[in-house]
Amino acid sequence: MKYLTYTLIIVLIIGWILGFLIFKILGGLIHLLLVLAVILIIYNWFLARKTKN
C-alpha cells in the first residue's frame, strides 16, 4: 500500500506539471490534482508516523 500511495503521488504531480505547461484550458482540474497529491503526501506521512509508534 505504501508504494501504491507514492506511485499515485508521483503520477498526480507529473500530471499537474504536464497539464500546467501544456494544457492551459484545464487549469482547474490540474490544480485539483495538485491538491490531491498534497493531501496524499500528508496522509501518508501521518500513516507512517502511526506505524512507527
Image (cartoon, rainbow, N blue to C red):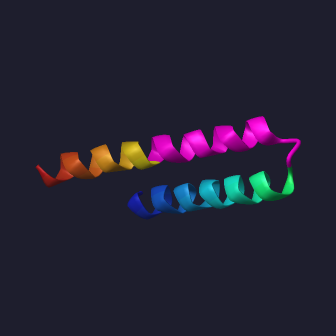
Q: Does residue 29 appear to the left or right of 36 in the view shown? A: right
Question: Does residue 29 sit above or below 21 in this rendering?
Answer: above
- Provide residue 1's location: percent of width, then percent of height: 41, 57
Task: State the residue at coordinates (56%, 41%).
Answer: 36
- Provide residue 11's location: percent of width, then percent of height: 62, 60
- Provide residue 49's location: percent of width, then percent of height: 21, 49
Task: State the residue at coordinates (29%, 46%).
Answer: 47
Task: State the residue at coordinates (78%, 53%).
Answer: 19
The image quarter in which residue 31 lies = top right
Range drawn in magenta: 24-40
Q: Residue furthest left?
A: 53
Task: State the residue at coordinates (47%, 40%).
Answer: 39
Which sits in the foreground, 30 or 4?
30
> How would you classify the magenta stretch by its main secondary structure?
helix
Residue 23 lies within the magenta run:
no
Which sits in the foreground, 18 or 49?
18
Q: Does residue 47 appear to the left or right of 2 in the view shown? A: left
Which sits in the foreground, 42 or 3?
42
